[in-house]
């Protein structure tokens, strides 16, 4: 059995897992491995097959190269508007991922909301990250907590609001035309 070491993929796996606020058990479940195996791998006490490493990197949203290349500088990644990965959303909401994998410390989404469109039928939560919601164009109402006037915030172009992603939230286009918004979330929300 190998001795504990800071070399090899283990420490990088732990680094990417903790940045995503993913538990050992969650990573193990997604990668089809046992939690004790993942723990031993992260501490450098065992090795993994290429197949297992591929499942782990897929679960973490990284490439095999990301796992082994600690010295590679961050490379610029141009994302053209037409090439943004589109995410399925509520009717009338067209949401796009702006930040690219591997998601390290931040994730950014852009969305176009048609008049009357809502991000969800009811307020929702995801993880416990810092979230900034910025209106680029249009008029949006965002609720933080229950969907009542007391918890509503009306935002126009250039307005933003910051809140923990663990607070139930919901946004709706209250204007007559389309609205364009950005979400900036740090650290990245675990799946």
Image (cartoon, rainbow, N blue to C red):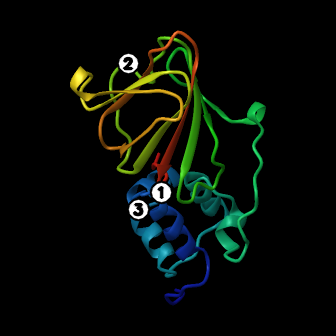
Residue behind mark 2 = 121
Residue 32: where, in percent of width, then height?
50, 53
Residue behind mark 3 = 24
Image quarter for residue 167? top left
Could you say which is closer to the camera, residue 137 or residue 142?
Answer: 137
Could you say which is closer to the camera, residue 23 or residue 44?
Answer: 23
Does any portion of residue 148 appear in the rendered image?
Answer: no
Dot 1: element: loop
Q: CA distance from mark 2 to mark 3?
A: 32 Å
Up-down relation of residue 176 to residue 32 (above or below): above
Q: CA distance from mark 1 to mark 3?
A: 11 Å
Residue 174: where, in percent of width, then height?
44, 15
Residue 2: where, in percent of width, then height?
54, 87
Q: Residues within 10 Å of mark 3 (few under 14, many from 20)?
A: some
Residue behind mark 1 = 20
Dot 2: element: loop
Does any portion of residue 102 appear in the rendered image?
Answer: yes
> In this rendering, which labeled residue sits more in front, label 1 or label 2?
2
């Amino acid at each position: 059995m190998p001795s504990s070491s800071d070399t090899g993929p283990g420490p990088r796996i732990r680094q990417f897992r903790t940045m995503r606020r993913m538990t050992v058990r969650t990573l193990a479940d997604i990668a089809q491995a046992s939690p004790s195996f993942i723990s031993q791998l992260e501490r450098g006490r065992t090795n993994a097959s290429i197949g297992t490493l591929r499942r782990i990197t897929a679960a973490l949203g990284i490439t095999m190269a990301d796992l082994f290349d600690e010295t590679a500088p961050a490379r610029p990644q141009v994302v053209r508007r037409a090439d943004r990965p589109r995410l399925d959303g509520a009717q009338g909401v067209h949401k796009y991922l702006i930040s690219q994998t591997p998601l390290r410390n931040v994730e950014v989404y852009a969305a176009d909301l048609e008049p009357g469109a809502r991000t969800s039928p009811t307020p929702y939560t995801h993880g416990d990250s810092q979230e900034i919601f910025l209106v680029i164009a249009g008029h949006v109402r965002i609720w933080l907590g229950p969907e009542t006037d007391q918890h509503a915030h009306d935002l126009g172009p250039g307005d933003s609001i910051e809140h923990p992603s663990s607070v139930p939230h919901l946004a709706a286009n209250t204007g007559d035309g389309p609205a364009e918004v950005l979400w900036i979330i740090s650290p990245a929300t675990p799946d």
